[in-house]
Image: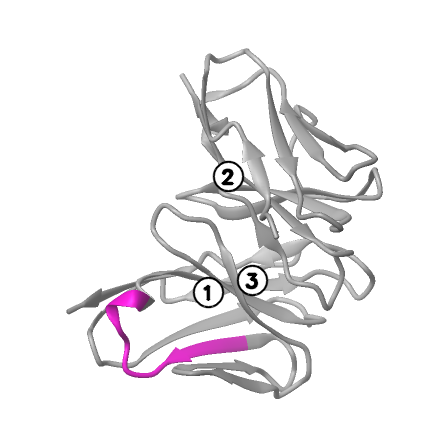
Amino acid sequence: KAGVTQTPRYLIKTRGQQVTLSCSPISGHRSVSWYQQTPGQGLQFLFEYFSETQRNKGNFPGRFSGRQFSNSRSEMNVSTLELGDSALYLCASSLVGGRYTEAFFGQGTRLTVV
Amino acid sequence: GQQVMQIPQYQHVQEGEDFTTYCNSSTTLSNIQWYKQRPGGHPVFLIQLVKSGEVKKQKRLTFQFGEAKKNSSLHITATQTTDVGTYFCAGLNGWGNTGKLIFGQGTTLQVKP
């Protein structure tokens, strides 16, 4: 079956701009989580969506937002970009989330803010 | 908030040597997962441990979950160059249905042939 698809793979944006990243989970998976990966901070949880509702949120400013559509596809948006937002953004899908389900990660979107 | 610490940060070994990475949580975990990320790649699920004191093996990899469910380890016997990558532990926050994984900082393994 097809894996998790993230688009675009690479992005270069200017400070102050906004950006939207997309994630298509594995068919049948209803939980989608987003993570930010940087060399200094590692993998940091952004938020999780399940059945179009945000179920969990990490410690990121309000500039980071997301949503999930009825087909489980998810988008995350970052407004007023800062240099520190440069990172690999990873999306992970799982069947229902929770204690007994593994997360399948996409290839990520590499965002560079200049 | 909950923290998951992982050591060492880097490990260089000669091919054939053993390798171990350790993971410690500030709080009791409902379960722990291990992922491997190859250079330039994305994290790939390796295994999940749920029970206190659980030990699981995958060929040359041995995973342990501590009795108090606050620590875990991954041991690789006789490393090979294909083992190169960063190994992450990830604790699941909370006891209900949630996808919030708290990742350790990872241990990057380099293997010299």
Disc 2: which residue: A108
Q: Which chain is indicated by disc 3?
A: B
Residue closest to the eye, A42 or B38: B38
| Image position of A66 with respect to B79: above or below | above
Extreme residue in the front direction: A1
Q: Amino acid at mark 2?
A: Gly
Left/right of residue B87 with respect to residue B80 in the rendered view: right
- Residue A44 locus on image (x, y percent): 56, 46
Disc 1: which residue: B6
Residue drawn 65% across and 58% down? B2
Question: Which element type, helix, strand or loop, lies under badge 2?
Answer: loop
Residue drawn 50% across and 70% down? B23
- Span shown in magenta: B72-82
Question: Which element type, helix, strand or loop, lies under badge 1?
Answer: strand
Label 3 Cα crowd, 10 Å radius (few <14 / some 14-19 / many 20+): many
- Have a look at marks 3 and 2 and say if they share a chain: no
Q: Amino acid at mark 3?
A: Val
User: What's the CA distance linking mark 1 and mark 3?
Assistant: 7 Å
Residue closest to the eye, A82 or A5: A5
Residue drawn 65% across and 82% down? B68
Label 2 Cα crowd, 10 Å radius (few <14 / some 14-19 / many 20+): many
Q: Which chain is indicated by disc 1?
A: B
- Residue B44 locus on image (x, y percent): 50, 58
Single out the mark in the foreground, 1 or 2. Answer: 2
Q: Are marks 1 and 3 in contact (CB under 8 Å)?
A: yes
Extreme residue in the left direction: B113
Disc 3: which residue: B4
The quadrant of the picture occupied by the C terminus of chain B is bottom left
Question: Which element type, helix, strand or loop, lies under badge 3?
Answer: strand
| Image position of A108 with respect to B19: above or below | above
